[in-house]
Structures are given as C-alpha cells and as structure tokens.
Image (cartoon, grey):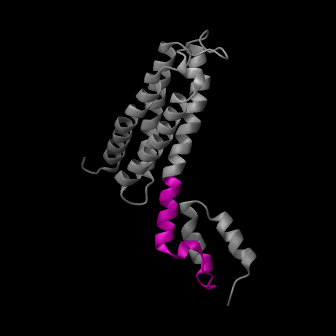
Amino acid sequence: MRAPRHLLVAVAVTCVSPGDLPVARVILAPLGVPTVWSHPEVSFVFRSFVVVVGSFVLWVLLAGGLSELVLPRIFPGDFVTGRVPSNAVLMASAALFAAISIPCAWLCARFAPARPARHVLWFLILAEVIGADALFIDLNNPWTSGGEGWPRWYSVARLLTWPATCWIGLLLARRSAGQAV
C-alpha cells in the first residue's frame, strides 16, 4: 500500500525534532510508508547537520543580540553610526563573543548524536571559515585600509579565541555527561 505524496510531505514537515522521530516511525511503519527517518545514516547526518548549524546560528543570534543590547549600555558614547568603536569596546565585544561561544559549543557537544568532539570540530571549522572570510573581506575593504576602520587585531582575536572556547565547551559537555576528559 503506497501512501499519497501529501501524507509524506506532512510527516516530513511535522517531524523536524529528534523527539518526533519515534512517533513518525510508529505511525508510518505499519503503513509501509518510507520516510527519511527510516534510514539510520540519513537520520544521523541530518541530526548532525542540524546540531552543528543550529549551534552556530544560535551563536550568531546571541552574539549579535547581546552585543547590541549590552555593550551600548556599558559604553554609551562609543556606538555612533559611521565611527569605529574604541579599543575598550572592541575588547569587550571580543570577550562577549568568546563567552557566548562556550555554551554554544557545549550545546553542540551535548546534542550531538554521536562523537561530540567531531561535532564541535565541525562547529569550530564553520566558525573559522566564516570568520576568515570576514577577515579577508575586511582586509580588502577600502574603508579600513586608510587607518580609519576596524583594527586588524579584532578579527584576528576572534579567530584565535574560537579553538580555545570550543575546547572549553567540549570539556564542559564531557564533564556534565560524566565522561573522562
């Protein structure tokens, strides 16, 4: 018995969280409906992708949101449109970004379907590639080449702190799971 295509689409749309997977299998397995979740390899890769990319998107949202909410209150005169913030603000921003990456790496390791270290490594690689891309764009930007723009140390500091903060997040996830470090 083949299920209509609209049933497959409805199930694929409603079963997006890992907690819904057993429900989809229980309901659709007796009907003989093939789903993406029927294949363990596809399910594992999809969950791994969601964990890594979801952790990074969470970092982007938290880092962008908190830097816009917290830093202007701590440094009220430094956020003027068209002007680069002072070094103190940029150091606080880099520290905030590093602090936010620790719980995001912890979440990545905590919700990884298997091999948390490998998932945190991919989280790190994703962040470093996007950060390096932003650094190269900044290096080629004529606005920053005249000494009026963002200092180079800011982008480099953010790239250098990622490995350490991801490692700390992985250690915290291992410690909370009771695994040996």
Which quadrant does the N terminus fall into?
bottom right
Magenta-highlighted residues: 27-51
Q: Is residue 88 left or right of residue 181?
A: right
Q: Quadrant of residue 164?
A: top left
Q: Is residue 166 above or below residue 180?
A: above
In the image: residue 16, left or right of residue 128:
right
Q: Nearer the viewer, residue 58 or 143?
A: 143
- Residue 70 in view in this figure: no
Does 44 appear in magenta? yes
The mark tally for this picture is 0
At horizontal 59% and vertical 12% (from top left) the residue drawn is: 78
- Residue 45, image x and y in percent? 48, 64
User: Which residue is rendered at x = 51% and y = 69% of the image?
Assistant: 42
On screen, 20 above or below 164? below
Q: How far from the left and from the top, in percent, is residue 97?
A: 48, 30
Q: Main secondary structure of the magenta part?
A: helix
Q: Specify whether residue 41 is painted magenta.
A: yes
Is residue 92 at least partly visible in the picture?
Answer: yes
- Looking at the image, the residue that sits furthest to the left is 180
